[in-house]
Image: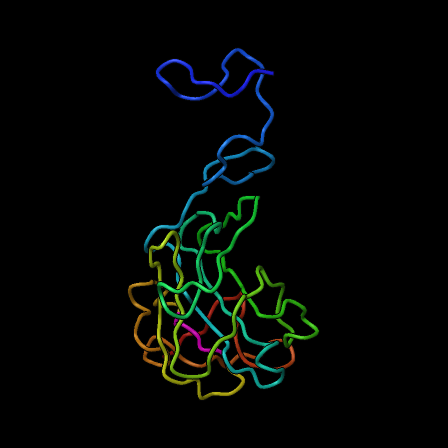
């Protein structure tokens, strides 16, 4: 079996020769799409937004019922997406060998507990959230490869049992940065699962 070799002006490959066994090549920045490797499509600024979060559930423990919702505003892959409370200190990075592709308009639901029997009856969770959410004086951010994509800060989540929800008219990372609980944010009024309020993996309510 021939080794990986340079050809032509120096690119790598084995044109017109048997392919080498996989394992020695550099797969950084790649993911598997239907069994075929391709380059990861990273989200760009303005293409993903934080739309809703539940920091203080009432009907289950915080450690079971906290969740976060994102919305894709374009098509890209979630591989490498960084999440946390303060930009620059990621607490979780989404990773998988396969391409975690999403399309424009798709919601991404992350929850600390994926089991609906324990998390308050959430719809199917896309990813487990690798950190808990504070009830006050905190924030959330989404980034990729060290680039900030969206962030928000909030001083308090005073409405026990209701998610903090972004008005659909402001599904834009440039318009949702004011402290949650402002005009663009409000507490959800629609019950889900066991009875806590929110619209996980569904369209948010209008705030005004």
**46 in magenta:** no
Estimate the x, y position of residue 153 in percent, counting from the top left: 35, 75
| Model colouring | rainbow
Q: Position of residue 23 (x, y in %)?
A: 58, 32
Number of labelled discs? 0
> Looking at this view, is 68 or 167 the one in front?
68
Picture coordinates of residue 177, whole percent (x, y): 31, 70
Residue 144: x %, y % from top left? 39, 54
Q: Is residue 65 above or below residue 168?
A: below
| Quadrant of the rendered image containing residue 72 | bottom left
Residue shown at the point (54%, 80%) measured from the top left: 197
The residue lying toward the viewer, choosing from 168 and 29, is 29
Residue at point 51%, 87% (across, down): 160
Residue in the picture at 38% in, 51% down:
145
Is residue 139 depicted above or below 16 in this figure? below
Left or right: where 2 falls relative to 183:
right
Residue ID at (46%, 83%): 135
Q: Give the range drawn in magenta.
A: 163-167
The quadrant in which the N terminus is found is top right
Q: Is residue 98 left or right of residue 30?
A: right
Above/below status of 35 relative to 208: above
Name, please, the residue furthest toward the right: 117
Where is the C terminus found, in terms of image quarters? bottom left
- Image quadrant in which you'd find residue 35: top right
Dominant secondary structure, magenta? strand
């Amino acid at each position: 079996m021939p080794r990986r070799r340079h050809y032509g002006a120096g690119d790598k490959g084995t044109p017109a020769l048997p392919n080498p066994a996989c394992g020695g090549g550099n797969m950084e920045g790649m993911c598997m799409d239907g069994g075929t490797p391709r380059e990861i499509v990273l989200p760009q600024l303005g293409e993903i937004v934080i739309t809703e979060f539940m920091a203080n559930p009432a009907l289950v423990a915080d450690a079971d019922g906290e969740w976060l919702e994102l919305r894709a505003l374009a098509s890209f892959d979630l591989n490498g997406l960084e999440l946390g409370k303060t930009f620059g200190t990621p607490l979780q990075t989404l990773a998988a060998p396969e391409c975690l592709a999403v399309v424009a308009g798709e919601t991404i639901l992350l929850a600390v507990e994926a089991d609906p029997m324990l998390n308050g009856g959430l719809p199917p969770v896309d990813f487990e959230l690798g950190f808990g959410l504070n009830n006050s004086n905190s924030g959330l951010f989404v980034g990729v490869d060290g680039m900030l994509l969206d962030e928000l800060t909030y001083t308090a989540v005073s409405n026990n049992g209701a998610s903090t929800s972004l008005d659909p008219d402001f599904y834009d990372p440039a318009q949702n940065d004011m402290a949650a609980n402002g005009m663009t944010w409000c507490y959800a009024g629609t019950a889900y699962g066991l009875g806590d309020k929110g619209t996980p993996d569904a369209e948010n309510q209008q705030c005004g």
